[in-house]
Amino acid sequence: MSLEKIGDPRDLTHWMGHMETDYSYTYGIAGEKFFKELKENAKIMGTRCKNCNLIYVPPRLFCERCFEKLDTWETVSKRGSVHTYTIANIDIDGSKLKKPIIWAMIKIDNVHGGFVHKLGEVDSKDVEIGMHVEAVFKSRKEREGSMLDIKYFRPAKQKLEKALR
Amino acid sequence: MFAKRRVAVVGAGLTLFRRNLKETGRELAFEASKMALDSAGLTRKDIDCVTLGTAPDAFDGIHMKGENLSDGAGAYRKPYTRVFVGGGTGVFAPNAGWWHVASGLFDTCLVVAEEKMSSCFPHPQYAFTTIFDPIMSRPIGMNLVWIFAIEMHRYMHVHGIKKEQIALVSVKNKGNAMDHPCAQLPAKITVEDVLNSETLVHPVQRLDISPTSDGAAALVLASEKVAKEITDDPVWIDGVGWGIDSTYWTNRDLYYPKYVECAARMAYKMAGIKNPPKEIDVAEPYDPFDYKELHHMEGLLLCKKGEAPKLTEEGVTQRDGDLPINPSGGLLGVGNPIAAAGLMKVCEIFWQLRGEAGKRQVPGDPRTGVAQAWGDLMQYGSVIVLRS
């Protein structure tokens, strides 16, 4: 049921136009190091703020609290917990997705922060807030230095915990 | 630290809110501006400066929207500023107007807010895909409804809130909008209607969301001296507040809008408000989604954390309740042309405190009201306190 009286804007007298602009975004100083490690070693890096006793993930060049430059890099866990999640049934234009997508905010273990990413290898009925998950990486050949080098996060496999860290 | 000059709202104007309006953005801005000036008994000549609020350029599709809208906002050959803090713009624009006058630099300020989302074709959601960090977030494919859904889920999880409780907000606001002449989605609906509506992005359903809209709103602000010359019913801006939380939303706990609390504390301190639920008679918190009204009531310190759903169930937030919330019908009922929707809320508080809200009038001669908007990447709060 929708109460919205949706009309096509083209029903009004109109002129179609477009604003085409492409962009080349630099990774930045912190981002370059983060994505290099992600791509080459499948490692997740963070930067530590000694003043505020926080490890920022994703890493940053500066601490937003004490405003000091950060240059202490740490390899952090590939695991975290589901802070919250959603199951998307529709695409951006409102059209139905063939397969629902599970999006989650994942807080990485023992750091300040984490990622928003997809969950995989799990049925949407079985996802819970607080659930422990781990990053699943693409193969070295497929990784290109992008957030998509992590395919998704999946429920953490308890037995492998030590080996994966 | 606060300015000595008091600033009053002396006029307000609002266009229809609709999905697709024929008028251009500047025509909408003109309509709202003209209406606000007329209601104050002033003309463009009486206006010293203009403050315009409008959200991302990508909606209207003009990469210099402030300049494009300026003539419609009455700014021709006047000191003119565009302000933009995402969804918070509609309440931030009068805050910016306030300092123009409170500083002593100007005696009158026309505050205008406009949005024409229908230009973004085929759907304004496409404009939202580029508000995120291009490297960390955009490749993942986030969109705006999804990020709300995960915030809503976190809020429900932490406090054990049921969807039925949240749906009551949509029922109330769409119902309140039945009495609003500009409303886009007034409706008499039930909790069941909300719960039976299509699940878009769990737990968000169709009737939990405000629409995309075209529209404009405007206010006329005046110094105390000018206000007393032109009206017997000035409504004073007694508090303004704004603030932002971490840019990294993964570094926040989404269950509580700390950014709103920061802005509210700033505004309440200025207004001398110590006990918000007791001292505030009517409130217009930002409600692009039904849970957001509850979330923002808590951030505005109108109740304890997690208590807003209970107050809603008890009828406290109804128009005739002890603490009427969104008597206008809010974004859920009146519509959501982003910046204009925020300023619509300030217009509503103005009309409520003047006793000019017609069928929407809150009983009991309300004297103190608060309006709030929220924006940027879910971490910006803007608050204004008005008193009659």
Image (tube, coloured by chain):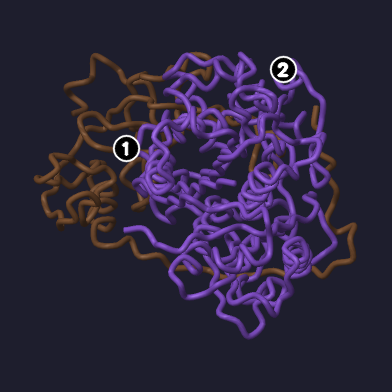
**To which quarter of the image does residue B353 belong?**
top right
The residue depicted at 36 percent of the width and 19 percent of the height is A130
Q: Quadrant of the C terminus of chain A?
A: top left
Q: Tell me the crowding category of disc 2: few under 14, some 14 to 19, or many 20 or more residues within 10 angstroms, Cα based.
A: some
**To which quarter of the image does residue A20 belong?**
bottom right
Say if labels 2 and 1 share a chain.
no
Where is residue B106? Give x, y as percent. Answer: 52, 74
Front residue of this view, candidates A102 and B328 = B328
Front residue of this view, candidates A127 and B191 = B191
Please give the residue where the numbered disc 1 appears in the rendered image.
Answer: A114
Q: Which chain is brown?
A: A
Q: Nearer the viewer, mark 2 or mark 1?
A: 2
Front residue of this view, candidates A17 and B194 = B194
Q: In the rendered view, does A40 fall on the left or right side of B272? A: left
Where is residue B234? Give x, y as percent. Answer: 63, 55
The residue depicted at 60 percent of the width and 82 percent of the height is B78
Chain of the residue on which disc 1 is drawn: A
Q: Secondary structure at mark 2?
A: helix
Number of marks in the rendered image: 2
Q: Amino acid at mark 2?
A: Val
Q: In the rendered view, does B25 fall on the left or right side of A11? A: left
Q: Which chain is purple?
A: B
Q: Is residue B139 something that shows in the picture? A: no
Q: Is residue B104 above or below residue B378?
A: below
Please give the residue where the numbered disc 2 appears in the rendered image.
Answer: B191
Q: In the rendered view, does B325 fall on the left or right side of B38? A: left
Q: Is residue B38 above or below residue B196?
A: below
Q: Amino acid at mark 1?
A: Gly
Where is residue A136? Give x, y as percent. Answer: 35, 32
Front residue of this view, candidates A13 and B293 = B293
